[in-house]
Image: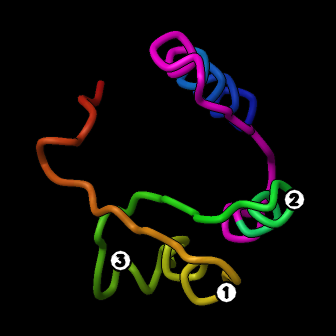
Amino acid sequence: MLDRQEQVARNQVDALRERHPWVATIVRRGSPRQVILDVADEIAADLIVMGTHGRSGFKRWVLGSVAEHVVRHSQIPVMVVRQTADDAAPTG
């Protein structure tokens, strides 16, 4: 399962590089909450920009919120962009 997810991520990164060759990408394994903070520190980032699905209530409590964790624990500014229905990628 992890290998499949990693391949999907790498395919998305490759597609991003084709459209925007100036964009730097990093793919890491681990807890997203901690990896985002670690990488931001490693590359001396000035800003973290991340998306959120905008879950609330029970779903957020059960699934947790990576964005909320990063906002609360980051030593640098974090910009969180909420996904809209128009932004949603087609599934299937």
Q: Label 1 to label 3, Cα distance in Å?
A: 21 Å
Using the image as rendered, state which of residue 85 and residue 73 is in the foreground.
Answer: 73
What type is the residue that disc 3 sits on?
Lys
Residue 2 pos. (x, y %):
72, 37
Compared to residue 6, the image places residue 58 above or below, namely below
Q: Which mark is residue 38?
A: none
Tell me where the magenta segment starts and ends, as one range.
15-36
Verify CB contact (< 8 Å) between mark 2 and mark 1.
Answer: no
> Which quadrant would residue 4 be assigned to in this image?
top right
Nearest to viewer (mark 3 / mark 2): 2
Residue 45 is situated, as x and y percent measured from the top left of the image, at 71, 60
- Which residue is most to the left? 86
Q: Residues within 10 Å of mark 2 (few under 14, many from 20)?
A: few
Label pair 3/2, CB-CB below 8 angstroms: no
For marks 2 and 1 on the same chain, the one whose residue lies earlier in the sequence: 2
Q: Between label 1 and label 3, give the one nearer the viewer.
A: 1
Residue, far right = 42
Q: For residue 40, which quarter of the picture?
A: bottom right
Q: CA distance from mark 3 to mark 2?
A: 32 Å
- The x and y percentages for residue 88 are 23, 41
Foreground pick, 83 / 24: 24
- Which residue position is annotated with label 2? 42
Q: Secondary structure at mark 1?
A: helix
Q: Is residue 87 left or right of residue 16?
A: left
Q: Secondary structure at mark 3?
A: helix
Residue 69 appears left or right of 32: left
Q: Which mark is residue 59?
A: 3
The amino acid beneath tag 1 is: His
Horizontal side of residue 63 vs 70, given as left or right: left
Front residue of 49 and 35? 49
x 50%, y 81%: residue: 68
